Amino acid sequence: MTTLAPQVGRQRSRRRPTSRTLAPYLFVFPNMLIFAVFTIWPAINGLNLSFYDSSNGRTFRPVGTENYTSILSDAEFWAVVRHTAAFTIGFVALSTAVATALALMLHAQRRGRGALSAAYFLPVLISPVVVGIVWRAALDRQTGLVNQVLSAVGLGQPGWLVEPSLAIVAIILVGTWIHLGFYAMILLSGLQSIDTSLYEAAKIDGSTPWQSIRLITLPLLRPTMMVVIILATIAGFQAFDFIYTLTGGGPVRATTLMVQYIYENGFSYPIAYGLASAAAVILFVVVFVVTFVNYVIGRRSEAI
Protein backbone atom coordinates (compact mmCIF):
# COMPACT_ATOMS: atom_id res chain seq x y z
CA MET A 1 0.00 0.00 0.00
CA THR A 2 2.79 2.33 0.85
CA THR A 3 4.36 1.81 -2.63
CA LEU A 4 1.10 2.08 -4.65
CA ALA A 5 -0.19 5.25 -3.03
CA PRO A 6 2.41 7.61 -4.58
CA GLN A 7 1.83 6.04 -8.05
CA VAL A 8 -1.95 6.54 -7.84
CA GLY A 9 -1.34 10.09 -6.72
CA ARG A 10 0.97 10.76 -9.71
CA GLN A 11 -1.58 9.24 -12.14
CA ARG A 12 -4.32 11.48 -10.77
CA SER A 13 -2.05 14.51 -11.03
CA ARG A 14 -1.42 13.69 -14.73
CA ARG A 15 -5.14 13.80 -15.59
CA ARG A 16 -6.09 16.89 -17.52
CA PRO A 17 -8.74 19.14 -15.96
CA THR A 18 -12.20 18.71 -17.47
CA SER A 19 -12.25 22.33 -18.66
CA ARG A 20 -9.03 21.79 -20.68
CA THR A 21 -10.43 18.57 -22.18
CA LEU A 22 -13.65 20.27 -23.28
CA ALA A 23 -12.03 23.51 -24.47
CA PRO A 24 -11.15 22.30 -28.02
CA TYR A 25 -14.70 21.03 -28.55
CA LEU A 26 -16.18 24.34 -27.36
CA PHE A 27 -14.04 26.23 -29.89
CA VAL A 28 -15.09 23.90 -32.71
CA PHE A 29 -18.77 23.76 -31.70
CA PRO A 30 -19.93 27.07 -33.35
CA ASN A 31 -18.43 26.07 -36.72
CA MET A 32 -19.85 22.54 -36.46
CA LEU A 33 -23.27 23.99 -35.59
CA ILE A 34 -23.20 26.31 -38.63
CA PHE A 35 -22.01 23.44 -40.85
CA ALA A 36 -24.81 21.20 -39.57
CA VAL A 37 -27.55 23.83 -39.99
CA PHE A 38 -26.52 25.19 -43.39
CA THR A 39 -24.97 22.08 -45.02
CA ILE A 40 -25.89 18.79 -43.37
CA TRP A 41 -29.56 19.59 -42.70
CA PRO A 42 -30.29 20.98 -46.23
CA ALA A 43 -28.57 17.93 -47.73
CA ILE A 44 -30.71 15.53 -45.69
CA ASN A 45 -33.84 17.58 -46.43
CA GLY A 46 -32.99 17.57 -50.15
CA LEU A 47 -32.55 13.81 -50.13
CA ASN A 48 -35.93 13.42 -48.42
CA LEU A 49 -37.57 15.87 -50.85
CA SER A 50 -36.37 13.83 -53.82
CA PHE A 51 -38.98 11.19 -52.91
CA TYR A 52 -41.89 13.66 -53.05
CA ASP A 53 -43.80 15.40 -55.81
CA SER A 54 -44.91 19.03 -55.60
CA SER A 55 -46.67 20.68 -58.53
CA ASN A 56 -47.33 24.01 -56.76
CA GLY A 57 -44.43 24.18 -54.32
CA ARG A 58 -46.69 23.89 -51.26
CA THR A 59 -48.28 20.44 -51.11
CA PHE A 60 -46.09 17.37 -51.24
CA ARG A 61 -47.09 13.85 -52.25
CA PRO A 62 -44.81 10.84 -51.67
CA VAL A 63 -43.91 9.21 -54.99
CA GLY A 64 -41.08 6.84 -54.05
CA THR A 65 -38.38 6.68 -56.72
CA GLU A 66 -40.60 8.12 -59.47
CA ASN A 67 -38.55 11.34 -59.68
CA TYR A 68 -35.36 9.36 -60.33
CA THR A 69 -36.97 7.21 -63.05
CA SER A 70 -38.44 10.33 -64.67
CA ILE A 71 -35.04 12.05 -64.76
CA LEU A 72 -33.15 9.01 -66.03
CA SER A 73 -35.69 8.60 -68.87
CA ASP A 74 -35.53 12.32 -69.79
CA ALA A 75 -33.60 12.96 -73.02
CA GLU A 76 -32.84 16.53 -71.93
CA PHE A 77 -31.19 15.26 -68.75
CA TRP A 78 -28.76 13.10 -70.74
CA ALA A 79 -28.01 16.02 -73.05
CA VAL A 80 -27.22 18.10 -69.96
CA VAL A 81 -24.98 15.27 -68.67
CA ARG A 82 -23.03 15.28 -71.97
CA HIS A 83 -22.62 19.06 -71.86
CA THR A 84 -21.49 18.92 -68.21
CA ALA A 85 -18.99 16.14 -68.95
CA ALA A 86 -17.60 18.00 -71.98
CA PHE A 87 -17.25 21.22 -70.00
CA THR A 88 -15.68 19.53 -66.96
CA ILE A 89 -13.12 17.55 -68.99
CA GLY A 90 -12.11 20.60 -71.01
CA PHE A 91 -12.07 22.86 -67.96
CA VAL A 92 -9.99 20.48 -65.83
CA ALA A 93 -7.47 19.75 -68.61
CA LEU A 94 -7.02 23.40 -69.65
CA SER A 95 -6.98 24.77 -66.10
CA THR A 96 -4.39 22.26 -64.89
CA ALA A 97 -2.12 22.70 -67.92
CA VAL A 98 -2.23 26.51 -68.00
CA ALA A 99 -2.01 26.88 -64.22
CA THR A 100 1.04 24.59 -64.15
CA ALA A 101 2.74 26.61 -66.90
CA LEU A 102 1.87 29.85 -65.11
CA ALA A 103 3.17 28.55 -61.77
CA LEU A 104 6.45 27.47 -63.40
CA MET A 105 6.80 30.91 -64.95
CA LEU A 106 6.10 32.68 -61.64
CA HIS A 107 8.48 30.36 -59.79
CA ALA A 108 11.28 31.24 -62.21
CA GLN A 109 10.47 34.95 -61.92
CA ARG A 110 12.96 36.63 -59.62
CA ARG A 111 11.50 40.13 -59.60
CA GLY A 112 7.86 41.24 -59.50
CA ARG A 113 6.53 37.79 -58.56
CA GLY A 114 4.18 39.25 -55.95
CA ALA A 115 2.67 41.81 -58.32
CA LEU A 116 2.20 39.23 -61.08
CA SER A 117 0.64 36.74 -58.65
CA ALA A 118 -1.83 39.39 -57.47
CA ALA A 119 -2.70 40.27 -61.08
CA TYR A 120 -3.39 36.64 -62.02
CA PHE A 121 -5.36 36.07 -58.79
CA LEU A 122 -7.60 39.11 -59.34
CA PRO A 123 -10.32 37.28 -61.40
CA VAL A 124 -10.91 34.95 -58.44
CA LEU A 125 -12.10 37.96 -56.42
CA ILE A 126 -14.59 39.18 -59.03
CA SER A 127 -18.20 38.04 -58.81
CA PRO A 128 -18.84 35.24 -61.35
CA VAL A 129 -22.07 36.99 -62.34
CA VAL A 130 -20.12 40.14 -63.24
CA VAL A 131 -17.54 38.04 -65.09
CA GLY A 132 -20.29 36.51 -67.21
CA ILE A 133 -21.77 39.90 -68.10
CA VAL A 134 -18.37 41.39 -69.00
CA TRP A 135 -17.34 38.43 -71.14
CA ARG A 136 -20.74 38.41 -72.87
CA ALA A 137 -19.97 41.92 -74.09
CA ALA A 138 -16.36 40.99 -74.97
CA LEU A 139 -17.43 37.91 -76.98
CA ASP A 140 -20.24 39.60 -78.91
CA ARG A 141 -19.94 38.61 -82.56
CA GLN A 142 -20.35 42.11 -84.00
CA THR A 143 -19.15 44.54 -81.35
CA GLY A 144 -17.08 42.39 -78.94
CA LEU A 145 -13.45 43.25 -78.23
CA VAL A 146 -12.28 39.67 -78.87
CA ASN A 147 -13.68 39.54 -82.39
CA GLN A 148 -12.37 42.99 -83.19
CA VAL A 149 -8.84 41.81 -82.33
CA LEU A 150 -9.29 38.55 -84.28
CA SER A 151 -10.70 40.44 -87.26
CA ALA A 152 -7.73 42.82 -87.19
CA VAL A 153 -5.31 39.90 -87.61
CA GLY A 154 -7.42 38.22 -90.31
CA LEU A 155 -9.09 35.47 -88.24
CA GLY A 156 -12.65 36.59 -88.94
CA GLN A 157 -15.48 37.00 -86.45
CA PRO A 158 -16.35 33.66 -84.80
CA GLY A 159 -19.83 33.34 -83.31
CA TRP A 160 -18.71 32.53 -79.79
CA LEU A 161 -22.14 32.82 -78.23
CA VAL A 162 -24.36 31.85 -81.20
CA GLU A 163 -22.72 28.63 -82.45
CA PRO A 164 -23.17 25.62 -80.10
CA SER A 165 -19.68 24.16 -80.71
CA LEU A 166 -18.00 27.52 -80.00
CA ALA A 167 -20.25 28.34 -77.04
CA ILE A 168 -18.97 25.33 -75.06
CA VAL A 169 -15.40 26.42 -75.90
CA ALA A 170 -16.22 29.95 -74.73
CA ILE A 171 -17.47 28.83 -71.30
CA ILE A 172 -14.41 26.58 -70.88
CA LEU A 173 -12.09 29.51 -71.64
CA VAL A 174 -13.95 31.90 -69.33
CA GLY A 175 -14.15 29.29 -66.55
CA THR A 176 -10.42 28.69 -66.84
CA TRP A 177 -9.76 32.45 -66.74
CA ILE A 178 -11.74 32.79 -63.51
CA HIS A 179 -10.01 29.98 -61.58
CA LEU A 180 -6.53 30.19 -63.15
CA GLY A 181 -4.98 32.39 -60.45
CA PHE A 182 -6.26 30.23 -57.60
CA TYR A 183 -4.91 26.99 -59.07
CA ALA A 184 -1.62 28.66 -60.03
CA MET A 185 -1.11 29.83 -56.42
CA ILE A 186 -1.65 26.28 -55.15
CA LEU A 187 0.87 24.91 -57.65
CA LEU A 188 3.32 27.72 -56.88
CA SER A 189 3.27 26.77 -53.19
CA GLY A 190 4.00 23.18 -54.25
CA LEU A 191 6.94 24.32 -56.38
CA GLN A 192 8.38 26.34 -53.50
CA SER A 193 8.35 23.25 -51.27
CA ILE A 194 10.71 21.34 -53.61
CA ASP A 195 14.28 21.14 -52.30
CA THR A 196 16.47 23.43 -54.42
CA SER A 197 19.52 21.19 -53.83
CA LEU A 198 17.97 18.71 -56.29
CA TYR A 199 18.18 21.30 -59.08
CA GLU A 200 21.76 22.20 -58.13
CA ALA A 201 22.79 18.54 -58.26
CA ALA A 202 21.04 18.09 -61.61
CA LYS A 203 22.76 21.21 -62.98
CA ILE A 204 26.16 19.85 -61.93
CA ASP A 205 25.31 16.62 -63.77
CA GLY A 206 24.63 18.62 -66.93
CA SER A 207 20.84 18.53 -66.88
CA THR A 208 19.02 20.98 -69.15
CA PRO A 209 16.15 23.15 -67.78
CA TRP A 210 13.56 21.00 -69.57
CA GLN A 211 15.11 17.80 -68.16
CA SER A 212 14.97 19.32 -64.66
CA ILE A 213 11.27 20.12 -65.13
CA ARG A 214 10.47 16.69 -66.55
CA LEU A 215 12.53 14.58 -64.16
CA ILE A 216 12.38 16.62 -60.93
CA THR A 217 9.64 19.24 -60.93
CA LEU A 218 6.70 17.39 -62.45
CA PRO A 219 7.14 14.13 -60.44
CA LEU A 220 7.49 16.02 -57.14
CA LEU A 221 4.62 18.35 -58.07
CA ARG A 222 2.26 15.45 -58.81
CA PRO A 223 0.51 15.43 -55.38
CA THR A 224 -0.22 19.16 -55.66
CA MET A 225 -1.46 18.70 -59.22
CA MET A 226 -3.87 16.01 -57.99
CA VAL A 227 -5.28 18.50 -55.48
CA VAL A 228 -5.80 20.99 -58.31
CA ILE A 229 -7.44 18.34 -60.50
CA ILE A 230 -9.85 17.35 -57.72
CA LEU A 231 -10.75 20.98 -56.96
CA ALA A 232 -11.20 21.74 -60.67
CA THR A 233 -13.38 18.64 -61.14
CA ILE A 234 -15.70 19.73 -58.34
CA ALA A 235 -15.79 23.31 -59.70
CA GLY A 236 -16.55 21.99 -63.20
CA PHE A 237 -19.54 19.96 -62.06
CA GLN A 238 -20.84 22.89 -59.98
CA ALA A 239 -20.38 25.60 -62.64
CA PHE A 240 -23.48 27.73 -63.10
CA ASP A 241 -23.42 31.44 -62.21
CA PHE A 242 -21.02 32.85 -64.82
CA ILE A 243 -22.44 30.54 -67.52
CA TYR A 244 -25.99 31.65 -66.77
CA THR A 245 -25.10 35.34 -67.25
CA LEU A 246 -22.77 34.61 -70.18
CA THR A 247 -24.94 32.37 -72.38
CA GLY A 248 -28.14 31.72 -70.42
CA GLY A 249 -27.61 28.04 -71.23
CA GLY A 250 -27.79 28.62 -75.00
CA PRO A 251 -27.56 28.58 -77.88
CA VAL A 252 -30.13 25.78 -78.28
CA ARG A 253 -29.30 24.61 -74.71
CA ALA A 254 -25.73 23.73 -75.73
CA THR A 255 -24.28 25.23 -72.54
CA THR A 256 -26.98 24.12 -70.10
CA LEU A 257 -25.18 22.19 -67.39
CA MET A 258 -26.40 20.14 -64.42
CA VAL A 259 -26.73 22.96 -61.90
CA GLN A 260 -28.80 25.06 -64.32
CA TYR A 261 -30.99 22.00 -64.96
CA ILE A 262 -31.53 21.71 -61.17
CA TYR A 263 -32.18 25.46 -60.87
CA GLU A 264 -34.76 25.49 -63.68
CA ASN A 265 -36.65 22.51 -62.23
CA GLY A 266 -36.63 23.92 -58.72
CA PHE A 267 -37.33 27.59 -59.31
CA SER A 268 -38.97 27.96 -62.74
CA TYR A 269 -42.61 27.27 -63.56
CA PRO A 270 -43.89 24.57 -63.26
CA ILE A 271 -42.06 24.13 -59.97
CA ALA A 272 -40.75 20.60 -59.43
CA TYR A 273 -38.86 20.49 -56.15
CA GLY A 274 -38.80 16.68 -56.19
CA LEU A 275 -37.22 16.47 -59.65
CA ALA A 276 -34.69 19.18 -58.77
CA SER A 277 -33.78 17.40 -55.52
CA ALA A 278 -33.40 14.05 -57.31
CA ALA A 279 -31.13 15.68 -59.91
CA ALA A 280 -29.08 17.27 -57.10
CA VAL A 281 -28.68 13.88 -55.42
CA ILE A 282 -27.52 12.35 -58.72
CA LEU A 283 -25.03 15.21 -59.17
CA PHE A 284 -23.71 14.66 -55.63
CA VAL A 285 -23.19 10.94 -56.29
CA VAL A 286 -21.41 11.64 -59.59
CA VAL A 287 -19.11 14.27 -58.03
CA PHE A 288 -18.36 11.98 -55.08
CA VAL A 289 -17.51 9.01 -57.31
CA VAL A 290 -15.34 11.04 -59.71
CA THR A 291 -13.52 12.74 -56.83
CA PHE A 292 -12.94 9.40 -55.09
CA VAL A 293 -11.58 7.86 -58.31
CA ASN A 294 -9.25 10.84 -58.79
CA TYR A 295 -8.09 10.47 -55.19
CA VAL A 296 -7.39 6.74 -55.58
CA ILE A 297 -5.52 7.31 -58.85
CA GLY A 298 -3.49 10.07 -57.20
CA ARG A 299 -2.57 7.87 -54.24
CA ARG A 300 -1.50 5.02 -56.51
CA SER A 301 0.61 7.30 -58.69
CA GLU A 302 2.34 8.64 -55.56
CA ALA A 303 3.13 5.10 -54.44
CA ILE A 304 4.78 4.21 -57.77
Image (cartoon, rainbow, N blue to C red):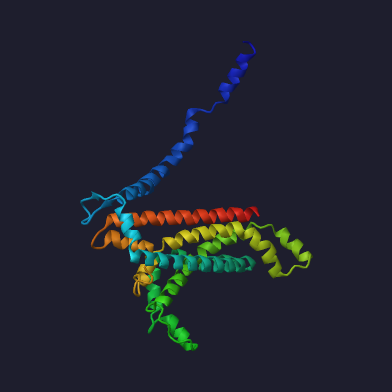
In this picture, residue 47 sits left or right of residue 194: left
- Rendered location of residue 14, percent (x, y): 58, 25
- Rendered location of residue 103, percent (x, y): 59, 65
Q: Is 92 in front, or is 28?
A: 92
In this picture, residue 52 sits left or right of residue 91: left
In this picture, residue 278 sits left or right of residue 110: left
Determine the residue positioned at 34% across, 49% down. 47
Residue 301 appears in the rendering = yes
Q: Is 288 in front, or is 38?
A: 288
Determine the residue positioned at 56% across, 22% down. 12
Q: Quadrant of the N terminus?
A: top right
Which residue lies most toward the top here?
1
Q: Is 93 in front, or is 131?
A: 93
- Could you say which quadrant of the image residue 71 lies in? bottom left
Determine the residue positioned at 66% across, 58% down. 194
**Eyeballing the image, is 111 above or below 279?**
below
Tally of numbered tags? 0
- Rendered location of residue 235, percent (x, y): 45, 61
- Rendered location of residue 143, percent (x, y): 38, 83
Q: Is 269 in front, or is 188?
A: 269
Determine the residue positioned at 78% across, 68% down. 206
**Eyeballing the image, is 77 above or below 292?**
below
Which residue lies most toward the right here?
205
- Could you say which quadrant of the image residue 212 lies in? bottom right
Residue 121 appears in the rendering = no
Q: Quadrant of the C terminus?
A: bottom right
